[in-house]
Image (cartoon, grey):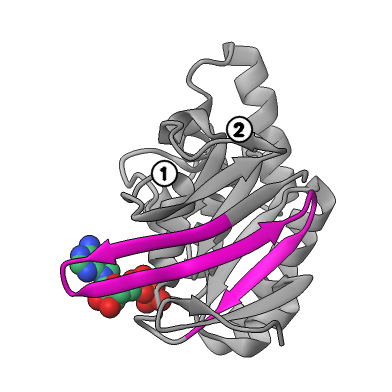
């Protein structure tokens, strides 16, 4: 099995089961949306895939190799959040290049320029991120997430803080960007329309359990 394979994953908090025996595959280049209400376990699932949760049961593999016990930074996955979490003291270019600290300076500059083009923000490199609109900030966050060419992008409601019109517009944009770069992704949202815009396939989550695809 190529791509991500989640098998029988369970995460428990003191209050109860957050992720309940979840199994799911993400094929190479595939974008899968996980749709569910608040509290259904979506974020916990993403965090578990990223290696940020203790598992009660289950396994994760990438291209057939077991990664269940691999440290987060060795998985090659990137997690992006609702509020983008840009570094306010760095300009746009340095935010995008943040994960490329091991790269040579010229290569890093070229990669940052490429990503600025990808997200339609050419010429924005030296702007302070505090001067960006909400939509621009999320495009910078998307560029930063894509910069190290992750094997898999984990997107946790990346558009939820934006207004409806911008959300629809950026949904298309995210879809296009993931497709063009061939990056497989797990996209978490509570918005059906957004899920259908962004993803190849939508699965639903409720009370920690995955339900049948829509
Ligand atoms: P969603 O992202 O779908 O809103 P979450 O994964 O954040 O859902 O939460 C799933 C369940 O786990 C909820 O009942 C939530 O209260 C609980 N939960 C989430 N994070 C923690 C935590 N760090 N400690 C304890 N319980 C948590
Ligand atoms: Mg969440």
The x, y position of residue 209, in whole percent, is 48, 78
**Whether residue 175 is situated above or below residue 182 in the rendered picture:** below
Q: Which of 129 and 80 lies nearest the eye of the viewer?
A: 80
Q: Main SS of the magenta segment? A: strand
**Which residue occupies 30% across, 72% down?**
17
Q: Which residues lie in the magenta part? A: 7-36
**Whether residue 21 is situated above or below residue 190 in the rendered picture:** above
The x, y position of residue 128, in whole percent, is 42, 46
Q: CA distance from mark 1 to mark 2?
A: 18 Å
Q: Are marks 1 and 2 in contact (CB under 8 Å)?
A: no
> How would you rate the neighbour count of disc 2 (Cα within 10 Å): few for under 14, some for 14-19, many for 20 or more?
some
The x, y position of residue 23, in whole percent, is 58, 64
**Which residue occupies 40% across, 62% down?**
10
Q: Which of 74 and 130 lies nearest the eye of the viewer?
A: 74
Whichever of labels 1 and 2 marks the residue nearer the N terminus, that label is 1
Circle 1 is placed at which residue position? 51
**Whether residue 132 is situated above or below residue 38 in the rendered picture:** above
Mark 2 element type: loop
Please identify, in this view, whether the residue under mark 1 or under mark 2 is nearer the observer.
Answer: 1
The x, y position of residue 58, in whole percent, is 47, 53
> Where residue 148 is drawn, which disc sits there?
2
**Which residue occupies 55% across, 55% down?**
154
Name the residue at the right extreme.
180
Q: Which of 108 and 192 lies nearest the eye of the viewer?
A: 192
Q: Which of 167 and 51 lies nearest the eye of the viewer?
A: 51
Reply yes or no: does residue 34 show up in magenta: yes
Mark 1 element type: loop
> How would you rate the neighbour count of disc 1 (Cα within 10 Å): few for under 14, some for 14-19, many for 20 or more?
many
- Ligand 1 is found in which quarter of the picture? bottom left
Q: Quadrant of the C terminus?
A: bottom right
**Whether residue 128 is situated above or below residue 104 in the rendered picture:** below
Q: Quick check: can you spot residue 74? A: yes
């Amino acid at each position: 099995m190529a791509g991500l394979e989640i098998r029988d994953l369970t995460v428990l908090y003191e209050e109860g089961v957050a992720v309940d025996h979840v199994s799911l595959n993400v094929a190479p280049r595939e974008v899968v949306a996980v749709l569910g209400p608040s509290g259904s376990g979506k974020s916990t699932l993403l965090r578990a895939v990223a290696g940020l949760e203790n598992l009660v049961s289950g396994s994760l593999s990438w291209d057939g190799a077991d990664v269940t016990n691999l440290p987060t930074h060795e998985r090659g996955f990137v997690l992006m959040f609702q509020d983008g979490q840009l570094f306010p003291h760095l300009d746009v270019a340095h935010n995008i290049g943040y994960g490329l600290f091991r790269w040579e300076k010229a290569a890093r500059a070229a990669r940052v320029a490429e990503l600025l083009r990808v997200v339609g923000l050419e010429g924005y490199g030296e702007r302070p991120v505090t001067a960006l609109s909400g939509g621009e900030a999320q495009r910078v966050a998307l560029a930063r997430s894509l910069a190290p060419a992750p094997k898999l992008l984990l997107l946790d409601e990346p558009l939820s803080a934006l207004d409806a019109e911008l959300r629809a517009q950026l949904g298309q944009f995210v879809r296009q960007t993931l497709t063009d770069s061939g990056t497989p992704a797990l996209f978490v949202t509570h918005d059906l329309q957004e899920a259908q815009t962004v993803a190849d396939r939508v699965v639903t989550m409720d009370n920690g359990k995955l339900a049948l695809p829509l």
